[in-house]
Image (cartoon, rainbow, N blue to C red):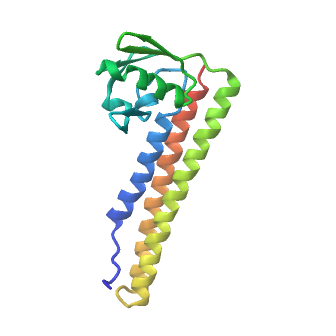
Amino acid sequence: MAAPTHSLDELKRRMQGALQALKQELGGLRTGRASASLVDHVQVEAYGSHMPMNQVATISVPESRMISVQVWDRSMVHAVEKAISAANLGLSPQTEGQVIRLRIPELNQDRRKELAKVAHKYAEAARIAVRHVRRDGLEVLKKMEKDHQISEDEHKRHADQVQKVTDQAIADVDQALATKEKEIMTV
């Protein structure tokens, strides 16, 4: 078995992956404004398989409270409508030919609070993922010290670097959450 190696860049990359996943999940949360990311992830049954909506249609935001879905293949319009309805986004599709319009209704205060709670759950999952990456990094350092690949001082110095990277990643998660929460709660 190869000796364990410590790479701060690898830990940063993995922590950034957790942050990117959080941003994608937060992008799918509906606020009062229309956003193409709201329906990007919706899976459409097309040509015998499931694919993201953005692979069968052009998604645009012509107005602040409307999403327009231009389906490329006329035979896919019904499948796209069905996928939007099945996604439980609280949107009702209005179809005109190959264009499906989705009006974004005003959010009431209770729904805003629910969405904020969901955003908090996503952020906590991202924080946990970041902490798992930190734990993995610290375990590698511990093993390297035990195997006499690094000294106790080097272990401490590297562990401090891992903690700094972790603190920055957690701060980035908190910032993304604060931004989304403000967006959700703004009337």
Task: Quadrant for residue 107, please give it.
Answer: top right
Q: Quadrant of the N terminus?
A: bottom left
Camera-side residue: 70 or 148?
A: 70
Q: Residue 75 falls in which quadrant of the image?
A: top left
Which quadrant of the structure image shows residue 149? bottom left
Taking 41 as reference, is 4 above or below it? Answer: below
Instruction: Say whether residue 3 is left or right of residue 66.
Output: left
Identify which residue is drawn at 45% across, 62% down: 164
Tell me what residue is drawn at x 49 percent, y 58 percent.
Answer: 130
Q: Point out the residue furthest to the top here.
A: 96
Q: Residue at x 53, y 45 (%)?
A: 174
In the image, residue 57 above or below residue 26: above
x then y, percent, for residue 9: 32, 63
Q: Nearer the viewer, residue 87 or 18?
A: 87
* Residue depicted at 60% across the width and 19% down the height: 187
Give percent across and percent down for residue 152: 43, 85
Q: Position of residue 137 (x, y in %)?
A: 43, 71
Q: How many marks?
A: 0
